[in-house]
Amino acid sequence: MSCTRRRAASFWGACLLAAIVTSPTAAQLRVVSYNTKGEPSTTSELNNYWQPILQQIGSESVNGIAKRIDVLALQEVDQSDPQAQDLANKLNQIYGISSYQTVVAGSGDGFNTQAFVYDSSTVQLLQTQTVYLAGVRPALRCRFQPVNYSSPNAAVYIYNVHLKAYPDSTAKRADETAAMRSNADNLPASTNIIYLGDFNVTEGASEQAYLNMPAPGNGQAFDPRNGQFIQDNPGNNALKNFATYSSTSLYSRIDLQLPSTELGDGEGLDLITANYHTFGVVPGSGGSAPTISPGILADASDHLPLVADYQLPAKMQVNMGAYPSQVIVDALAGVNVTVSNAAAVVAANGADELDYTVTGSGGVLGSNSGTDNALGGGNSHQLFLDTSMIGGRSGQLSVNSTSHAVENGSFSSNINYDVLAHANAAFDLADSNTLTVDFGSRMLGASSAQQNVSIYNLVGGSMTAALDFDQMFASGDTSVLSLGEDYFSNLAPAPGSSALLAVSFYPLSVGSFSANYVLSFSDQDLPGEITGQLLLLQLIGRVLQPGDANGDDIVNLSDLQILGDNWQQSGIGVAGGDFNDDGITNLSDLQILGDNWGAGVAADLSFQDALNRLGIDVPEPTTALSLLLLLGYRGFPQRRR
């Protein structure tokens, strides 16, 4: 090794080890094919050449994708040396993980066997088989599946091959690819397959070994570069963008990745054709300088790594919003659902697009469809609840994807809710919407009178919304006849159940009084509620002068006569002389009448004269109280006839 090369190797070994590249473990697949030529064989080579190459492959950004290797297919591995395990250990060291594992073919011709190093945190190894190709070099066939994907259509078979070299082996190579195709054609139709490795088709695109690969059958392959990788153009530097040249000279090494046609339809697991390239030259650069020191590549192997990125299938994620468990008939109510492509990728082109439909059935109405790219943020849709009929309703919201090999491609949720009739406010079970409360007559200055008014929520069907009392509008003599602000909410529609509103009568001045209260109600706070259900409450009452039994606003002989006619009677009220409203007409009421004698009119007859006129023979009292004392407990005197 020259001094210059040693300095370069030392530089890359130190700098690239410090600049450890990290990337998501669940993302599109980066598959690398590399003929190692039996290397690395020493720790120095592993650290100085292979470490920077592996690390640079993981950090190389192609069309927005930069990620560590998921599957590294190795050819010409020496069975007597743990080269594959050394590379797995180095990858684990680079990324600070322990998930890289190996699988090595069980047989080969000495050093010339095949192996895989794979990241078990991103791909599962489902199956391993050694496929013998016409008795020469066996292919190592492994079936991998991306982690967190369950569909068999998301798995891929990878055939890792090293075909016989040299022009005189043309027929042998044709036999080998024919045998490999025969094995692959026995797999189910539409199986994902990648044929990769050192194909050695030195005779170009017309060689039969190459022509066997795109032949019809279940394992039919296609060449992403249409033969450009197998053109032997040692003087054409522009083709370095395409062809897998030797690391030491412009001579084609003819390493290929040939996917099955299933991986070229743009759906599900699929090759990202624009990212398919020989490591060291970024696609589209027109043969620009390698992205890593040519000396490091040459000292590692006389082949160059062939890198391809494969998109993952879409992964559907459905987030359903809350929906009301109760609505009112004819409400506009629905349920929102967000559908997104949750494939864990580092760039949008790392996963298939998600195609889906959203459908309602039963009590859920509507349908929709959409597409969401990976990292697209998702789409929101609304379906509606059928609120046309009262009663318990049920339906189903379903989301289904048609994307190939989609993960979580089917979602459904049962939706149950109740449709309620509108609340119905009334003063009674007969559905009366007007009510008059007559407090009758009370004496001026008497204590206030109270009553309770019942408000019902009448049952309107098998299910009825609760009732809210929202506001009232008052007019008239509201200071005398008042309604308490006993607002309520969620009055249940139970038969016979009611809310009580207190109304009061305050006898503050003489006269006849009335007040009107318009009461406004609504359904409980649910989708579809209506407001403005109105009830009219009228309050009336009369305030009399104390001692005025006949309601003519004066206290005179007529009132005394009424009191006398009802003496010691019970339950007759003011009109019967019970002025203090204690339930009986007696001395207390007579005192009230005497104290207010002549009120409301110029007195032309004294209280004593009135007693005399009625034939009550008592000394003339100076006050009504004296009169009561004179009468004592003898009862009200009888008039002389």
Image (spheres, rainbow, N blue to C red):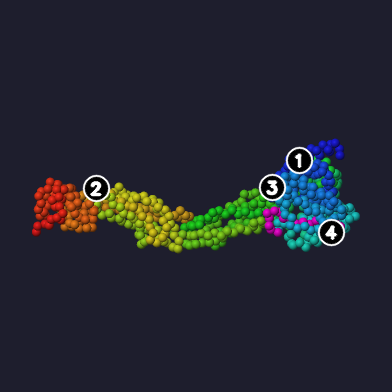
Across and down, in percent, residue 208 comes to 85, 57
Q: Which residue is mark 4?
A: 133
According to the picture, the residue beneath numbered tag 1 turns out to be 16
Q: Which residue is mark 2?
A: 445
Mark 2 or mark 3, which has the lower sequence index? 3
Residue for point 19% across, 57% down: 568
Q: Report the Cα–Cα distance between label 4 and label 1.
A: 40 Å
In the image, the segment drawn in magenta is 136-152
Q: Check whether the beta carbons of the residues at disc 4 and disc 3 lie within 8 A of each other.
A: no
User: Which residue matches tag 3?
Assistant: 24
Q: CA distance from mark 1 to mark 2?
A: 102 Å
* Residue kind at label 4, given as amino acid type: Leu
How far apart are the two marked residues, 4 and 3, measured between alpha carbons? 37 Å
Helix, strand or loop at disc 3? loop
Q: Is residue 252 visible?
A: no
Measured as percent of width and height from the top left, residue 504 is found at 30, 51
Q: Quadrant of residue 61?
A: top right
Please tell me whether mark 2 sits on a helix, a strand or a loop. Answer: loop
Report if the CB atoms under discs 1 and 2 are less than 8 Å apart: no
Labelled pair 2, 3 in contact (Cβ < 8 Å): no
Q: Could you tell me the amino acid type at mark 2?
A: Gly
Image quadrant where one finds the C terminus? bottom left
Mark 2 or mark 4: which is in front?
A: 2
